Amino acid sequence: MPNTATLLQLFGIGFSFGLAGPCLLVCTPVLISYITGKQLKFRQALVDISIFLSGRLLAYLLLGYLAGLSGLVLRQFANSGLVSLFKLAGGIIIILLGIYVWLGREPLSRLCKCKAGAIFNSGSLFILGFIVGVFPCAPLLALLLEITLISRSAMNGMLYAFFFGLGTFISGLIAVAALSGISTWLAPRFFKSKTAGLIFKLSCALLLILLGLNLIFKPYLYRV
């Protein structure tokens, strides 16, 4: 049975990661640009943030399972070509979200009479959250290797990762929700005219597209 103190410690580490750590730095620019550009109401913004963070939590469960199996398996996964494919897929989804912010849901609704915009929004945010979580940064990889040392089974590793992920989920929800609430409150007041609002919306869309391109091409730039 996993030690309760260890579980609480991992929860605290995850909380700090999500509130003022690498998890916040990686995810916040994408989420804030998307939420502000779409000019979502605060309640819908909370739903979208939760969907993204749920996808990331699922990724942490997978990594925790691999860590519970063995450190070798985790290292092989982290160094495999799959991570590059996940980064490519994540970049493409961020670019598509930028286009979605730019064009709105009307073009999708014309192609399909169902709620295509809502389906694309929820599905892409969940998948993006999973993709972001599944290629671990250096601090997270170090933590997962620590989980490898203390886990007696793959399920133990998954449980440890769940408590860490739960900490990042709660703190991430607090931090990103607060920032998105500020941005959605300020945007209408600074960009009152229709033209200014449109320029701001396009700026958010372009920022998302640039973030997506950076995720795709950043590994190749380091090789030059």
Image (tube, rainbow, N blue to C red):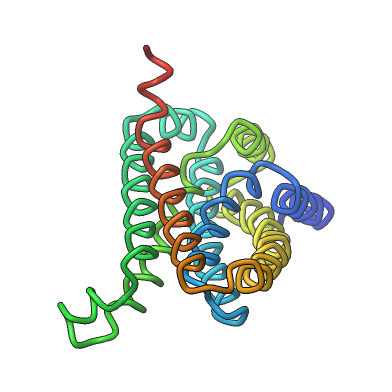
Of residues 14 and 218, the one nearer the viewer is 218
Residue at image coords 39%, 20%: 221
Of residues 36 and 71, the one nearer the viewer is 36
In this rendering, is residue 159 above or below 110?
above
Residue 129 percent location from the top left of the image = 48, 57
Query: Does residue 38 appear to the left or right of 116 in the view shown?
Result: right
Residue 88 shown left or right of residue 180 in the figure: left
Q: Residue at x 67, y 56 (%)?
A: 168
The residue lying toward the viewer, choosing from 40 and 133, is: 40
Q: In this view, does 179 lie to the left or right of 112?
A: right
- Total marks shown come to 0
Image vertical order of residue 208 relative to residue 219, above or below:
below
Q: Where is residue 74 in the image (x, y as percent from the top left)?
A: 49, 34
The picture quadrant where one finds residue 150 is top right
Is 147 on the left or on the right of 38, as rendered? right
Q: Which residue is found at the position 70% from the left and 65% from the top?
A: 170
Query: Which residue is rendered at x = 23% and y = 81% of the image?
Result: 109
